[in-house]
Image (cartoon, rainbow, N blue to C red):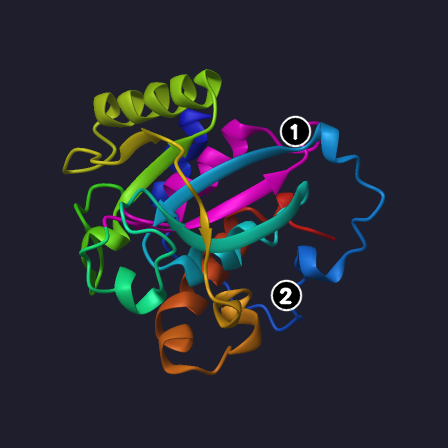
Amino acid sequence: MISSIFAFILAVSCSQPNEQFKTVRDIDMTTNNNDTLAVATFGAGCFWCVEACFSQMNGVVEVLSGYMGGTTLNPTYKEVCTGTTGHAEVAQIKYNPSIISYEELLEVFWFVHDPTQLNRQGNDIGTQYRSVVFYHNDEQKQLAEHYKKKLNESGAYASAVVTEISPAAEFYVAEEYHQGYFFDNPDQPYCSAVVRPKVEKFRKVFAEKLVK
């Protein structure tokens, strides 16, 4: 996986797909056996970007934008945006591990943001935008730590990877209007300027792993 990550880091050109994005919301998943599903939770900046990418992956059943890692009970978006609740904006991903592995999800996580930026992504500044893996079991913890270490040892980045790796805590689902935000609001200025370029770059690199 590490060699492929290096290739992703070097892939800086964006594609310009004209087709309608197909996501897990477009698929009838009622035949899935919930007993076979697993959960992953990642923070990588604005959750609109993160959700938009993961929700297009084959094997992903559901992606919810929300908040994790803070102390305030039932936080609102307005409260989280103050940076005082301790929460990160996250995407919680329900996936079928027989179709897509946690390692493949980690590949996407490392790709869709800059893990060397502390408490920010680009112009989005604050602890709510921190790079973080919230692990749900020991295997997820070990894999996240392993690949973080490999990335730092590789010198792939000019600066150290600062991604936080912490146990999953209470997950608070974000307000309804945040769910599927990019797909429902593609022409919103932030979506046009920030989310769309990330999504198009992601789609080019991970084309073979997208929902068909």
Local SS, label 2:
loop
Instruction: Find the residue positioned furthest to the right.
Output: 31
- In percent of the image, x 28 and y 43: which residue is there? 131
Q: Closer to the camera, 99 or 28?
A: 28
Q: Closer to the camera, 11 or 135?
A: 135
Residue type, mark 2 in image: Phe
Residue 99: quadrant of the picture: top right
Q: Closer to the camera, 88 or 102?
A: 88
Where's residue 54, x and y in %?
A: 54, 50
Instruction: Find the residue positioned furthest to the front.
Output: 73
Q: Is residue 10 above or below residue 126?
A: above
Residue 25: quadrant of the picture: bottom right
Where's residue 83, x and y in %?
A: 19, 58
Name the side, left or right, on which 33 lies relative to 197: right
Closer to the eye: label 1 or 2 = 1
Q: Which residue is mark 1?
A: 97
Local SS, label 1:
loop
Badge 2: residue crowd in 10 Å (few <14, some 14–19, many ≥20): some
- In percent of the image, x 56 and y 71: which residue is there? 183
Q: Is residue 58 visible?
A: yes
Q: Is residue 107 magenta?
A: yes
- Residue range (magenta): 86-114
Residue 21's disc is: 2
- In percent of the image, x 25 and y 47: which residue is there? 130
Distance CA(mark 1)–CA(mark 2): 23 Å
Q: Are marks 1 and 2 in contact (CB under 8 Å)?
A: no
Name the side, left or right, on which 26 lies relative to 119: right
Where's residue 127, x and y in %?
A: 20, 51
Q: Closer to the camera, 112 or 30?
A: 30
Name the side, left or right, on which 44 lies relative to 158: right
